[in-house]
Amino acid sequence: MATLAIAAIVAVLVLVLPLYIVYKPPSPLIRYFSHRWTDVIWRLWLPPSKKLVALTIDDAPSDHTRDILAALAASSAHATFFVVGNQVPGREHILRDIVLAGHELGNHGMRDEPARSLSDDELKKQIKLVEGIINDAYHAAGRARMPPNDDVEVDEGEVGTGMSSRRRRNHYYRPGSGFFSDRMRVLVRKLDYRLVLGSIYPHDAQIGNWRVNAKHILSMLSPGGIIICHDRRSWTPPMLQKVLPEMSRRGYKAVTVTELLDEATG
């Protein structure tokens, strides 16, 4: 009986532990990823006194974006919205309003699909198409996406020469489904973008319980973290209405990816 009990425990651990690690990746794992793929932004490592986290919102714009913007405004929070190009027609004014509210726009491709499976030509085409959409939104808002001298030195990591080079700092790409390849990294770098993933992901694209998602985010807060959540879901606004005030109560501030990078690079 004891042997069977031990076997059952081991079986449960083998099945459950990997799922738990995917759901709530431990800090050492994120640190390993950050060192393994230095050109990908997973999170920033800030001192405990700098309680900043980047809030990123995928799959924008949608019919729920205005409610998300209201939740952000109520807590004086900022976010980086990753734009899906085929969701924009008829919602161009929403992208403009995102920029006017002090948020920024990132590139999430033309369609909600696994970007890793796309050919180089298709991936490049999609990134450039969405880049045009984003530039139009900044122009409509009367804002410069790339102000003069708004580039910073970044380490190219293993996909480049290992040397620093100058890059437009607010050009970010997040691959659909969150998976990337070495081939994608090379292409994205050539297009002058940075890959942005994250360290705090409640899997809200699949989990529709906003209370569970809010608890997940709040349990993983740490200075320099990058939160991933999703537009186009009715449960995102109430989740943010819970998360953002509690973050403020704990002394945290939600900022854009660029603002987080500014803080990290001094």
Image (cartoon, rainbow, N blue to C red):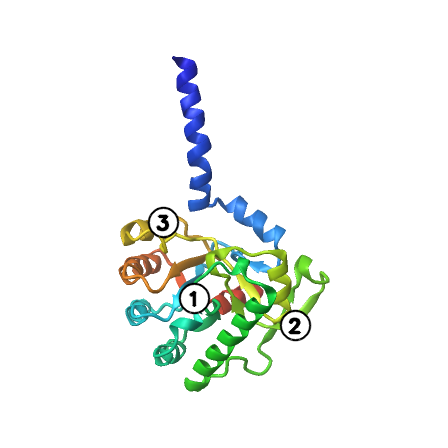
Mark 3 near mark 1, Cβ–Cβ under 8 Å?
no
Marked residue nearer the N-terminal end (3 or 2): 2
Mark 3 neighbour density, 10 Å: few (under 14) some (14–19) many (20 or more): some
Q: Nearer the viewer, residue 224 or 71?
A: 71
Residue topped by disc 1: 255
**Residue 240 image position (x, y, % from top left):** 31, 61
Residue topped by disc 3: 216
Residue 163 placement, left or right of 32: right
15 lies above or below 47: above
**Residue 173 image position (x, y, % from top left):** 52, 66
Image quarter in which the N terminus is found: top left
Which residue lies most toward the top here? 1
Residue depicted at 41% across the width and 17% down the height: 4
Q: Nearer the viewer, mark 3 or mark 1?
A: 3
Q: CA distance from mark 3 to mark 2?
A: 36 Å
Residue topped by disc 2: 166
Please, what secondary structure does the residue beneath circle 3 have?
helix
Image quarter in which the C terminus is found: bottom right
Q: CA distance from mark 2 to mark 1?
A: 23 Å
Mark 1 neighbour density, 10 Å: few (under 14) some (14–19) many (20 or more): many
Residue depicted at 50% across the width and 69% down the height: 258
Please, what secondary structure does the residue beneath circle 1 have?
strand
The residue under label 2 is which amino acid type? Answer: Arg
**Residue 24 in view, yes or no:** no
Which quarter of the figure has residue 5?
Answer: top left
Which quarter of the figure has residue 185?
Answer: bottom right
Residue depicted at 48% across the width and 68% down the height: 109
